[in-house]
Amino acid sequence: MTQLTDRRILVTESYPDGRNLAARASIYRYRRPPLDLAAAVLAELPARRGLVVDVGCGNGTYTGRLRAERPELDVLALDLSAGMAGTVGAPAAVADATRLPLADGVAAGVICAHMLYHVPDPAAAVAELARVRAADGTVLITTNAADDKAEITALWRAAAARATGADHEIPDVTEHCDLDRAQRLAESVFTEVRRIDLAGEVSVPEPAPVLAFLDSQRSITGRGLPVDEVLAAAHELVAGTIAATGAYRFGTHVGILVCR
């Protein structure tokens, strides 16, 4: 199986619909300071008319906000997962980020939120974002920094070791295109790239949201592991931490790249 095919299968298996993504996003209600990332991204989109493309639209967080808050824009949602694209409302289509079904220079704005690390060739995807952007348009890329959620990766590793009696390499899907790499790729094709770093801490007072977060990652992070047994071990570890310290905490670090 080629890397390209493998990553495409992982994306469609992990996101057949919006449930995993919703479960993952819900834990950020415990983030301090609070962050409305969609609002922060949309604030960087200049006031103008025209087409805005949400590449990798997922469950429609950005598409929905744009359509509700910026009715002067024509918003097109694209996603590799038919299940995702089918839930956000028309116009929407299934599309590969490395081969966008759009003419050159057609988009006043392009949003690419938390999806470059799923693309086998992120450089090709960034080149496509630049290709479809109008000369005076804006591309907004969000992704995680290398230190984002390091404690969650460590939790997977510790729980897997407890459940299986052996050490396991735990894949971090975002390292394929973290914030630093995304910035370098953007700087190679855009004249201006401005980076906004948004760091914080998630402090969860009970195990259930943490376990739901881990469960939503089972198709990728838990691949090849006895996930139910690992989650049971993770529950013990998280519950122990909460009993000892009052909360389970992990760091979060996301960035926005404003590209013109």
Image (tube, helix red, strand yellow):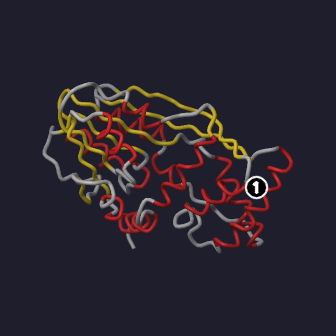
- Residue at the limit of the structure toward the right, as seen here: 244
- Residue 215's image quarter? bottom right
- Describe residue 32's horizontal placement relative to residue 1 as left or right: right
Residue 72 location (% of width, % of height): 21, 33
- Residue 99's image quarter? bottom left
- Describe residue 212's horizontal placement relative to residue 8 as left or right: right
Instruction: Label 1, secondary structure: give it.
Output: helix
Q: Residue at label 1?
A: 238
* Identity of the residue drawn at 19% across and 39% down: 51
* Identity of the residue drawn at 38% across and 57% down: 120
Seen in the picture, residue 111 relative to 209 is either above or below; the reply is above
Residue 73 location (% of width, % of height): 22, 36
Crowd rating for badge 1 (residues with CA inside 10 Å; few <14, some 14–19, many 20+): many
Residue 61 location (% of width, % of height): 40, 46
Number of marks: 1
Seen in the picture, residue 140 relative to 125 is either above or below; the reply is above
The N terminus: image quadrant: bottom left
- Describe residue 52's horizontal placement relative to residue 245 as left or right: left
192 or 103, nearer to the observer: 103
147 or 56, nearer to the observer: 56
The C terminus: image quadrant: top left
- Residue 155's image quarter? bottom right
Q: Amino acid at mark 1?
A: Val
- Residue at the limit of the structure toward the left, as seen here: 103
70 or 218, nearer to the observer: 70
Residue 191 location (% of width, % of height): 28, 26
Seen in the picture, residue 77 relative to 2 is either above or below; the reply is above
* Identity of the residue drawn at 16% across and 48% down: 102
* Identity of the residue drawn at 57% across and 37% down: 253
